[in-house]
Amino acid sequence: MTEGILFSLDGKEVTARTGQSIWDVAKENGTQIPHLCHTDRPSYQADGNCRACMVEIEGERVLAASCMRQPSTGMIVNSASERAKKSQKMVIELLATDQPERQNFHKPDSHFWKMAEINKISESRFPSRDMPLEDLSHPAMAVNLDACINCNLCVRACRDVQANDVIGMAGRGVHSKIVFDFDDPMGDSTCVACGECVQACPTGALLEKTMIEAPVIDRKIASVCPFCGVGCQLTYNVKDDKIISVDGRDGPANQERLCVKGRFGFDYIHNPERLTKPLIRKEGVSKKDIEGLDPSNPLTHFREATWEEALDVAASGLLKIKNQTGPGSLAGFGSAKGSNEEAYLFQKLIRTGFGTNNVDHCTRLCHASSVAALLETVGSGAVSAPFNEAKNSDVIIVIGSNPAVNHPVAATFFKNAVKDGTKLIIIDPRRQALSRYATYSLQEKPGSDVALLNSMMHVIAEEGLTNADYIKDHTENFSALKEHLKEFSPEAMTTKTGIDPDTVRQVARLYANANAALIFWGMGISQHVHGTDNSRCLISLALMTGQVGRPGAGLHPLRGQNNVQGASDVALIPMFLPDYQSVEDPEIRARFEKTWDAQIDPERGLTVVEITEAIHEDNIHGMYIMGENPAMSDPNVTHAREAFAKLDLLVVQDLFLTETAAYADVILPASAWPEKEGTVTNTNRQVQMGRPAVPLPGDTRQDYWIIQEIAKRMGLNWDYTHPKEVFGEMTGVMDSIKGITWERLENEGAVTYPCASEDDPGKPIIFDNGFPTASGRGTFVPASLISPDEVPDKEFPTVLTTGRLLEHWHTGSMTRRSKILDAVEPEPIIQMPPAMFEKLGISPGDFVTVQSRRGQIDIRARADGAVQKGMVFIPFCFAEAAANVLTNDALDPDGKIAEVKFCAVRVSKTVSLETV
Amino acid sequence: MGNSNSFLTTPRAPGAKKRKGRYYTKGRQVDPQSLTEIRELLTGQPLHRNLAIEHLHRLQDAFGHLKKRHLAALASELHMALSEIYEIATFYHNFKVADEDDDTPKFVIKVCDSLTCEMAGSANLAKDLAGNFGENVEISHGACMGRCDKAPVVRLKDHCVSNATLDKTIMEFEEYTSNSIKTASDHTSYEEYKEQGGFTFLSKLYSGGITSEEILEKLRESNHRGLGGAGFPHHLKIQSVLSVPGPRLMAVNADESEPGTFKDRYYMNNNPYQFLEGMLIGAELISAEEIYIFLRDEYSDTADILKEALAQIKIMGLSKDRPIHLRRGAGAYICGEESAMLESLEGKRALPRHKPPFPSHVGLFGKPTLINNVETLYWLPEILEKDSSWYSESGRHGATGYRTFSLSGHVNKPGVYRTPAGITAAELIAEYGGGIKDGHTFKAYLPGGASGGALPASMADIPLDFGTLEPHGCFIGSAAVIVLSDKDNLKNVARNLMRFFEDESCGQCTPCRAGTEKAIELMKEDQWDTDLLVELSDVMRDASICGLGQAAPNGFMSLLKHFPEELK
């Protein structure tokens, strides 16, 4: 144990630990030294600029800022001497001089005024000066720099914490002021609206617009964000049963950070289009009759029903199909947006009530191929290390991923790491916000990942940069890989990848020679017909260099949905029972049959796209879809919609009348995340607790209740009265989370698995000593070059890739119903390289027609230099110009994932279109 | 696979459709033309953010001002965020960011408004000038330009008009804009310096003819001190840097900006090689990897001299292949504060750092850094040559060594004077300054520029040295003595000094940023609330981060002490 630093504070002997400031020690000892520019929130460095925390140190000429100054042994510090107090008060008085009048300002209870109150400052003896006017240009935040005290916290929030680098302190001296970019209106700036500045601002100069309307809140609820797989913990601020604003909470993944969706995207639950009553399709309304269907008034096509009737119609319809055409003619899509408990119950219902393994969810369109490769090579489908390990990495590779858009808070930790000296390598056909931080940014040709990764491995093998000990001790089949790599020299691959050989060599060396290197990948790797091969290459790369199983090293497929990890773990997938135990293994099956007291189909079920095909082939007649929107998210989506319309019975459980619900026979109004209690598992394998903030609206119900009511009506003897009972059952059948109890989660908020017992803290970094495979070794699986399924040709010369926008989640059913998110990205756009505008003779904002072999859409064009020549990008969240009308449903043979990242299209100037 | 058109239809799409979409990516776009212009301008230049200030100078020199479209392109080339480049461009007073990209750049004429120039009538001159130029000329003010012996001074880009009058300024403006007048420099050449025995000790040090320890010992014996203002013993500073392991750097503070100070300029312009020899010896003593010279923007004539001299040194192999970077300031007095200078050398805004740690341990780019002022280094070869006793035996009234005074104000012969340390103001004025100007009565003097406080004529018999003035609330600082007379309004003097600090405050900390501004406001009144001003001054002295804020009230406080009746 290191000894503390003994010093005197206000006449008392106190002890400081190394690294603590005088301010920290004072706080620990119950003395609050005034502070304005200082916060002890995670990631915020002391800046010492406001000078409100000045203390007197004996023997020193001037006072010292206690937030910056670390005590030394024997130091005599006085925080309340007349001299110290004089400065503390004067600083607050100086700043109060130019503040707007407290009572008339939007945030009368700001930290600043609280500090002023404690120091008995209510007015100033100094003349005030003119202060800047308000800036209300941003949909989410109000800027009132008349309340700004130049404390710099928002700059640190934007630059040091979230590293979005939008806010700056421009000018000098008394003219220095907070600016966005070049002193542009916030709404016109590069601001990504993470809202970190708003949470940091001590005066209300930066404030959520919603807080202007309702400055006083009723209660705060601790929960976790429902959008992406990062799993940010947050606090809902609730007034009159409405979520007014959201603050970041200190979760293990996010450390109080949030992104625009997590901060400003919650009002969707209060959207008037919310379904609040069960609905049944009206007699005689065809499923092809979609024209005129308005989610705000579904009664043109549906009629309201009681829960009793709707559940009866749903369950009896499903039973009828089961009895007539067998269990295999039913299928279910569960949701990665619900809780673990809901996902678990859903797959249990399909397996034991429907009697089939035809259960899947959006993981099929996500990391199915990554998981297939990981299970095959290293025996575990989850990440080997949390993304926060980036801080311990010398080198990070981000490949086929755009985390600043899709995992914004994770991206902030990557940027932090780079600012601390980590080298970042980005490999992606598109440039991205992170590119500015990259040491190497490889804008490869789309679909050339195997060629590029094999050529990197070729260099590593050829130059002897492999980790021979690691290969010997922990892997197998390296010689086959080595042999295979011979023909993949960077020179041989350069025409395929578009990357010059020297760069490939430098990048390969940088990665291989790093003390610790982490690979992050996303849908750009997985959503290809060679998605599994792409992942195999990444795994081989890590294994051959031993870049796994240590702090700062590892493999991290960034999971998309907030609970896609958990939903997969609890077996919302057709080939596995919980914990990835094969459903085709009789021993495993027998164990579950005993626990669940039901028969389980011995054959694996169909996957998402296969189910669509099976409907077309008349093999599936009835479906239960909970919280998924395949009529938007499936590839070649018109083909999928046609399938859903063809079903004899479609039961949809959702918040809104989604594009999928349009084909439903029965619609069950569900609960939104902030209305329910349950656990979710993020990309870091952290199981976290979500808690209800507001009551259920109208006649909506908890999803687990709805699933159970269907189950009961299908003859299952279920009697769960609380999600915790479901969680208890899960921990009984899943070794991975055996040591996690509901109570523990309630207390700790998050526990990482694998977790074997209640006193096991959980294991963030796995594969530290071999792999959970039969041999205990990781296997190299060589990957050959496979072309994308549909390569550009004369007729369709351009590559279309699809993905998300920062502001819109998945198919947009939630985020497009959030006022702020909708305001920032209100309409469909295609992102095209600037040169393409010239070629087509159009300007940004003009309509283009995009055609593929499967369909066509008209869409306005956005100029985006990040998109490379010969390529376009369309986000798939816009129903009125759905990207998936165009995409290809060809599948990866192992992961059964569709190639939505690559298809051939033709882009032309829209000939005539009524634009009004 | 059949595709039915009916399946292209969906329910009405969500979204309020109240706003237009965005047809560009968020924020300002980098336009291709600006990018091309920036790339052409920076051809062959390293694209590193550390060089942002240098690149901004290139941009402004080429286009007359900084257009935002260029700034966006520059940010992109340097991998910087927009706000990061904008912060820098708006921090330094010599950069001018155009409001609109299509604005025509104006020729900016800067009239010095620091104390000596104001005493010489610069305020009226500025007013007169304002009516005499067309739309394309902007009359602005500037802080001390380091030519106080020739006050008032007007700056025309890289040319300064000395003893400026309306007519002289107009004439030189016309000359400047037609054929870019350049005054020929007349300094000791390399050969001359060499002939006088120059570079002997550097060569000795390189060859082992004298050891580092011997040099340090000589510095200790001589009692030589840092002459940038703080007076820290030279040998101790070197030893402090040596106490931490390398790699180490050397930074030379040639940002002489204290109003009334022009001695460093004098040395660099007259005998640059002696200064450079001192610098090279210093660098060798600490095994510096690289040397950075931070030269203020206002000394463009000096920059030319140094560029030529540095090239010569390189040719003669005297730098031992140590890279020497001559960096150009951009108009910020705060860069005289050593840690602010380091920030500026790193290409950032010049915000003073918090201490500890001290730059000798954690300095430029985080490396231990020896920071010396020009004059400090200038003395070094001379002390070695003439020996430490020659230096230490000089001095009056108990002080030791030599000092270089910049004398300005109401004296007959303002200028730079090398005197024994410890000389009094009265002696300095009489023996060197040719006495008080006719028609003036000696009333008060500032012993150390704008920050060193003020003393009445009755106290002109105090030895001027480190430590001798502190008991009277003053300090010698950079030895810039400004002489005031009965013709000067002391309230205006106090206002001028406070306004200088307000203008030069970096804005980082509240007591200095808001304190100087509020003090000015209070000083605008006819009747001064001296109690409140004193209370504010106490806090500025106690709670400001750096010496600028701490010294900002010195002028006011000492004038109030000695002339309470005049400052009511």
Image (cartoon, rainbow, N blue to C red):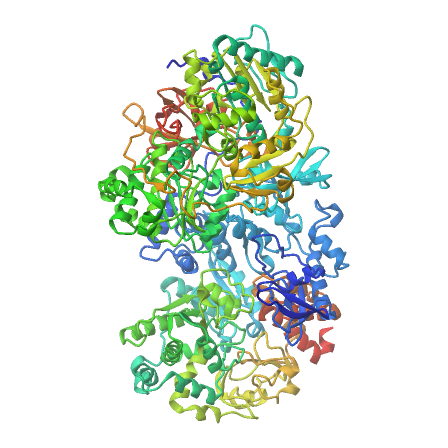
Q: Where does the image place residue A778, in percent across and percent down from the top left? A: 36, 42
Q: Where does the image place residue B374, in percent across and percent down from the top left? A: 44, 77
Residue B170 visible at all: no
Compare residues A894 and B43 and report the one nearer the observer: A894
Q: Where does the image place residue A527, in percent across and percent down from the top left? A: 39, 31
Left or right of residue A510, residue A705 in this image: right
Q: Where does the image place residue B75, in percent across and percent down from the top left? A: 43, 51
Compared to residue A671, the image places residue A495 above or below, namely below
Left or right of residue A333, residue A702 in this image: right
Compared to residue A636, the image places residue A33 above or below, namely below
Compared to residue B322, the image places residue A542 above or below, namely above
Left or right of residue B117, residue A149 in this image: right
Compared to residue A116, the image places residue A854 above or below, namely above
Q: In the figure, residue B524 lies in which quadrant?
A: bottom right
Q: Quadrant of the N terminus of chain A?
A: bottom right
Residue A111 visible at all: yes
